[in-house]
Image (spheres, coloured by chain):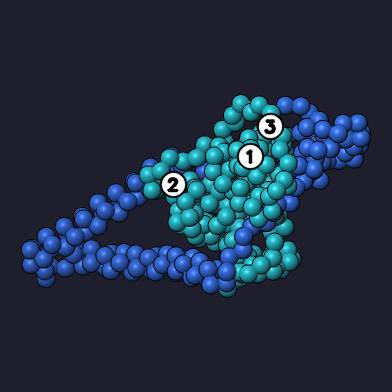
Amino acid sequence: MAGAGRTEVVPADEQRAIARCQRGDREAFELIVRLYTSRALAAAKAVVRDAALAEDAAQDAFVRAFRAIRRFRIGEPFYPWLYRILRNSCLTTLKRHGKPPPSLDAEGAPPPPAPPFDPAMNLAKEELRAAVRDAMTELSDPHREILHLSHFEGLSYREIADCLKIPIGTVMSRLWAARQALKKALAPRMAGHE
Amino acid sequence: MSEIRILLMGYADGELGPEDRARVEEALAKDPELRRELEEMRRLKEATLGIDALADAEVEAFWGTVYNRLERRAGWVLLLAGSAGVMGAGCYLFFTHEWAHWSVKLAGASGLLGTIVLVWSVWRERRRACAHDRYAREVRR
């Protein structure tokens, strides 16, 4: 999604910038940071659920990424690689601040089918978006994380599988369970609009 | 969980191959409840898609902090390397020259010992933290 603060870089330019970063060029890294700041901050918030900690974790992730960028294989998608570093930074940031780490890899029991609702009913798009954000705070860590990657970031199943290092089948089943949980959490918020 | 509903989710996300897509379309043609669920999924996805982009000033401030962190590391490395050089030269003089009074040598020895203890302690703490960080390998991939 284009917008303020988001530098538009086509993938070829991105790969060229990464190649320059691998030669230690910090100006090229600035381009990469500017390109991914919004996404990294939003993703970190989805994991740590605290704006200040999320910023700290995202900054730490970029510093780690710059130090490790020589090991990135040119030609591969950059975001899943960055996301794995970011996830790691979120966990270590939480640990450093004495907070319990989220159980991101745990698979819960499949939830019961959620009650049906029509998300369009009496709700404007922005209201629905806000309600979803609010409802997501009630979800388990793995569900919140996968919904963020699928719904807000719009990643494909393949990209989500790369980010989380899980098979595509697991992506589908976890996403389905997460959507059921989201619908359940949204239902009381929708009730007031019926 | 029903298989057709998981496939329906993949259909709404545009992730299915031709065979599964045909299966879902066949089921959709027969079942109005599935059609309603598909519409619901699409509207939910449409409403949530996209990250709220930060303002230019926020991105600028963020990059400033990242840059400072990168610079600070270089500063620390240079400072430690320089200190190690000075310390090494001091040790050499300490053992090879007779000119210093024993009290100066004692002060020098305690300073050196203190530095070794602190460096050892920090190294051990970091090693312990790495051993318990199961995601540490991610940055090495």
**Is there one chain holding both mark 3 and mark 1?**
yes
Measured from the top left, where is residue A166 in percent x and y? 66, 38
Judged from the image, the secondary structure of the residue bearing numbered disc 2 is: helix
Instruction: Using the image as rendered, state which of residue A109 and residue A183 is in the foreground.
Output: A183
- Name chain B's colour: blue
* In the depicted structure, whether residue A107 falls above or below residue A42: above
Of all chains, the one bearing label 2 is: A
Residue type pointed to by label 1: Ala
Give the quadrant of residue A115.
top right
**Reading the chain from its start, which is encountered first: label 3 or label 1?**
3
Quadrant for residue B92, please give it.
Answer: bottom left
Residue A104 in percent (x, y) is at 55, 39
Q: Earlier in the sequence, mark 2 or mark 1?
A: 2
Q: Residue at x 69, y 53 (%)?
A: A124
Can residue B127 be seen here? The reply is no
Q: Amino acid at mark 2?
A: Leu
| Left or right: A38 in relation to B76 | right
Whichever of callouts 2 and 3 sits on the residue coming sooner in the sequence is 2
Please say if A118 is above or below A31: above
Q: Which residue is mark 2?
A: A94
Q: Which residue is mark 1?
A: A191
At label 3, the amino acid type is Pro
Q: Which chain comes out cyan in the rendered image?
A: A
From the viewer's side, name the closer residue of A60 and A143. A143
